[in-house]
């Protein structure tokens, strides 16, 4: 290895470290409201409040209210209106917030106005980003005489005030803690998804920036082809690594969290009193159906990002699975052929061939007007021949020899993937004669 290449490797590592530091710096400054869709969170919290009959609110660590739902009339129409009782409300909020800042996993506080509030922290990537508040409720039946004296003391209309008190929900302390923690887990899960999207965006922007800078800096170098191959391999590797990580996170974290939420909803439903309103049970049922659909979507996204069969079965079984779904979606018949279908290539080679086949099949569905696609796979661990051909309308491939890349076909991307694993890609096509892509490793 030449000294120049070694220095360049050090330069690449330095830039990668710089990109990582920049990514972490950006993430450390993100607020909870940056990680979630506030409108969707509001709709979700409204639904939970309606189903459970309990008020809730999400506040940033700086005290900014992000969403709130179901606030009780006695608080909005009485306690928050009078200066003295409002001071007591603020005192409750402050006490709970201070407990969260001290690292408490859960806190409950009985306001001097007679109601009970609770809070739990929302933790994302080991960082305390927000708090979930529930409450404006009672944990036992109210002492009417106490509230009657309170109405007289602060000049509230006694009849209206006691009517508002009678509508305050009564929730046992242990159930209040379960509900508050469930809210916090749900809010953290939504933020985790947003954080993953931001990390992916930062990483992609850094990679794209590096690709642009490298192409400009090395465009006149004699070893441009070698350097481009190395860069492409790194880019493809980083991209696949990120897809694999996201697929694993969705499977291990998101799916398990969704399962936990489903169990929590089931527990809440089982604890509802027998005379609970039908609308509450209907709302819980609808919420569980939405959760079930979300779990199925998460599984499909995880599989699309990185099919597990590619790792334990190899490229041929993975493509068989993909071909079945492709045929079902497009109506195009996919035929799989080959002599030794059980051979295994290197992980990089199998991923590259899988992505090339995906790109080719996508092109076929968009442009070829084909009825049948044939995927042929032959060879051994040292030498493999991978051919994808269709009976579509084809195109004039002489354009490619003139340095033209047919718009939308992604041929450059497929060729770079093949070269990154030490292979070559050739394409043959003619109007009316279909298209044939061959990758030789």
Image (cartoon, helix red, strand yellow):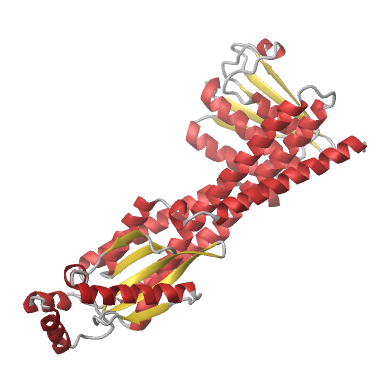
Q: Position of residue 440 (x, y in %)?
A: 78, 29
In the picture, the quarter occupied by the C terminus is: top right
Residue at screen point 70% across, 31% down: 213
Residue at screen point 36% across, 76% down: 118
Question: Which image quadrant for residue 185?
Answer: bottom left
Q: Is residue 429 above or below residue 441?
A: above
Residue at screen point 57% across, 26% down: 363
Q: Position of residue 169 (x, y in %)?
A: 23, 76
Q: Which residue is more in the foreground, 97 or 154?
A: 154
Observer able to see residue 240: yes
Q: Position of residue 318 (x, y in %)?
A: 64, 44
Residue furthest to the right in view is 2
Q: Position of residue 354 (x, y in %)?
A: 66, 38
User: Left or right of 258: which side holds 422?
Assistant: right
Residue at screen point 15% across, 78% down: 166
Question: Which image quadrant for residue 226?
Answer: top right
Q: Which residue is more in the foreground, 389 or 181?
A: 181
Q: Which residue is more in the foreground, 307 or 404?
A: 404
User: Left or right of 214: which side holds 295?
Assistant: left
How many numbered badges does the structure rendering display? Answer: 0
Observer able to see residue 307: no
User: Left or right of 304: which side holds 382?
Assistant: right
Q: Is residue 232 above or below residue 309?
A: above
User: Left or right of 402: which side holds 383?
Assistant: right
Q: Is residue 235 above or below residue 157?
A: above
In the picture, the quarter occupied by the N terminus is: top right
Q: Is residue 424 above or below residue 33?
A: above
Question: Which image quadrant for residue 411?
Answer: top right
């Amino acid at each position: 290895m030449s000294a120049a290449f070694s220095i360049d490797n050090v330069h690449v590592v330095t830039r990668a470290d710089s990109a990582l530091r920049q990514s972490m710096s950006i993430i450390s400054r993100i607020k909870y409201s940056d990680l979630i869709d506030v409108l969707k969170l509001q709709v979700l919290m409204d639904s939970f409040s309606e189903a459970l009959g309990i008020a809730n609110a999400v506040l940033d660590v700086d005290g900014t209210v992000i969403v709130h739902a179901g606030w009780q009339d006695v608080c909005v129409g009485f306690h928050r209106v009078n200066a003295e009782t409002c001071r007591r409300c603020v005192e409750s909020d402050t006490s709970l917030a201070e407990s969260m800042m001290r690292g408490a996993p859960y806190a409950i506080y009985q306001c001097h106005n007679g109601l009970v509030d609770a809070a739990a922290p929302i933790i994302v990537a080991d960082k305390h980003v927000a708090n979930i508040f529930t409450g404006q409720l009672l944990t036992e039946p109210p002492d009417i005489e106490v509230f009657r004296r309170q109405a007289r003391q602060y000049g509230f209309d006694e009849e209206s005030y006691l009517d508002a008190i009678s509508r305050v929900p009564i929730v046992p302390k242990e159930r209040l803690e379960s509900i508050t923690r469930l809210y916090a887990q749900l809010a953290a899960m939504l933020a985790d998804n947003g954080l993953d999207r931001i990390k992916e965006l930062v990483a992609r922007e850094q990679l794209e920036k590096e690709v642009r800078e490298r192409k400009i800096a090395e465009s006149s170098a004699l070893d441009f082809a070698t350097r481009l191959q190395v860069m492409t391999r790194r880019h493809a590797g980083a991209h696949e690594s990120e897809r694999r990580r996201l697929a694993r996170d969705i499977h291990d974290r998101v799916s398990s969290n969704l399962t936990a939420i489903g169990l929590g909803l089931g527990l809440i439903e089982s604890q509802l009193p027998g005379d609970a309103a039908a609308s509450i049970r209907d709302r819980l049922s609808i919420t569980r159906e939405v959760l079930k659909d979300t779990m199925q979507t998460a599984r499909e996204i995880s599989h699309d990002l990185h099919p597990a069969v590619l790792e334990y079965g190899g490229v041929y079984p993975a493509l068989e699975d993909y071909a079945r779904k492709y045929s079902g979606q497009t109506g195009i018949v996919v035929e799989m052929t080959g002599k030794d279908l059980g051979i295994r290539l290197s992980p990089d080679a199998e991923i590259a061939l899988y992505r090339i086949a995906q790109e080719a099949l996508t092109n076929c569905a968009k442009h070829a007007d084909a009825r049948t696609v044939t995927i042929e796979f032959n060879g051994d661990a040292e030498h493999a021949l991978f051919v994808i051909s269709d009976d579509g309308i084809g195109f004039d491939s002489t354009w490619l020899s003139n340095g033209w890349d047919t718009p939308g076909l992604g041929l450059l991307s497929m060729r770079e993937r093949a070269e990154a694993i030490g292979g070559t890609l050739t394409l043959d096509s003619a109007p009316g004669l279909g298209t044939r892509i061959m990758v030789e490793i």
